[in-house]
Amino acid sequence: MDFLPLFHSLHGRTVLVVGGGDVALRKARLLDSAGARLRVVAPRVHDAVSRLAAELHLRSYAPHDLDGIALAVAATDDAPLNAAISAQAQARGLPVNVVDTPALCSVVFPAIVDRSPLMVAVGSGGHAPVLARLVRAKIETWLPARYGQLAELGRQFRGRLKARLPGVQQRRIFWEDTFQGPVAEAVFAGRPDQARRLLEARLADAAPQAPGEVYWVGVGPGDPDLLTFRALRLMQQADVVLHEPAVPSVIVDLCRRDADRIALPGPCGGDTLAGLARQGKRVLWLAPGGCPWQPHGAVLDSLAAQAISCQTVPGVVASPAIAPALT
């Protein structure tokens, strides 16, 4: 990971933009939409840039222009000047972006899918911005425009749910179910009043402690591209991830990042799975191979005997050509 993705609040904060041409205009518009206060420095400035500037200095850059800023953007065609701005900003511990020069950047601008307050950022470390834009275009077609309304509805109910369900895990389960169920469908269908009524009803019926369950997922030959959509969905909502050494790390890394991950020396027993599930946790067992019930049917029988709900998802059966991937 060359850059850690972060969302930077710039509302009311001063951002320095050095440059006044078309490249500077693109950055200035984006920064202005994020609520930044623009300090623009350049001998000549595009009219549209000047209209966005809170401070406009029609002169060459000087080091004191870095005083009191939250971010510096060098958008000139003068390579030595851009390098100097980068060095001086970083010497002060200020984040800096030099357009089209990743080596001089401490931060980069991603391609953005804006469903405010929901935001999706796609980055390539500044090395393939066209590819990042193409990926963004794919996400734009997949993500309905009303996702922003769904996120805003969640914001409005967040405090009330926290008072109703003090446990982080139970709130997470509540929102996962809400954002994938009738409430979300009502929002997407353009019926916000119905969505609010459904959410009010769900909130009134919210149980303080939801029962845990087990997800038994076969990873097949170990190729992440061969995982089913259902497997990926369960991997993303599990609270605890158990796996053997035979399961490739590239598969384990697709699980929810804040889930507890436990590597075991061998197959997992039913008592271990049941014990975690009885704590109200959603427990994921990543099993090598295709059919989870075929060497471990006894474990599944044990879970059933203890009334622990278990979902099983078979993996793709390995062909002889790829079977050695898990050996």
Image (cartoon, grey):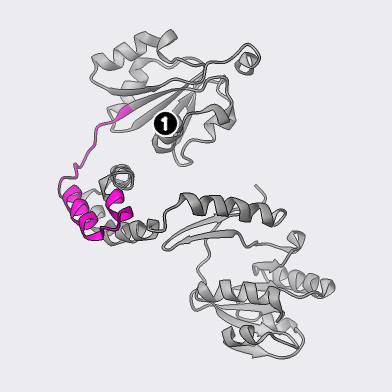
Q: Is residue 234 above or below residue 307?
A: below
Residue 282: name its quadrant.
Answer: top left
Q: Is residue 246 above or below residue 141?
A: above
Q: Is residue 192 visible?
A: yes
> Relative to the observer, which residue lies in front, 91 or 236?
236
Q: Is residue 124 visible?
A: no
Give the structural element (helix, strand or loop) at label 1.
Answer: helix
State the residue position of label 1. 230
Residue drawn at the location 52% of the way across and 36% of the way down: 254
Q: Is residue 134 above or below residue 67?
A: above
User: Is residue 217 magenta-colored?
Assistant: no
Residue drawn at the location 45% of the way across and 14% of the way down: 291
User: Is residue 190 magenta-colored?
Assistant: yes
- Amino acid at the residue labelled 1: Arg
Q: Position of residue 156 (x, y in %)?
A: 28, 62
The reply, left or right, for residue 39 in relation to residue 34 is right
How would you rate the neighbour count of disc 1 (Cα within 10 Å): few for under 14, some for 14-19, many for 20 or more? few
The reply, left or right, for residue 289 in relation to residue 109 is left
Q: Position of residue 102 (x, y in %)?
A: 73, 59
Q: Position of residue 173 (x, y in %)?
A: 31, 42
Q: Main secondary structure of the magenta part?
A: helix
Residue drawn at the location 37% of the way across and 9% of the way down: 297
Q: Is residue 239 above or below residue 264?
A: below
What is the count of numbered marks? Answer: 1
Point out the residue furthest to the right here.
80
Q: Position of residue 233 (x, y in %)?
A: 42, 35
The reply, left or right, for residue 208 in relation to residue 142 is left
> Relative to the observer, which residue lies in front, 161 or 312?
312
Q: Which residues are magenta?
A: 184-213
> Relative to the observer, which residue lies in front, 206 or 95?
206
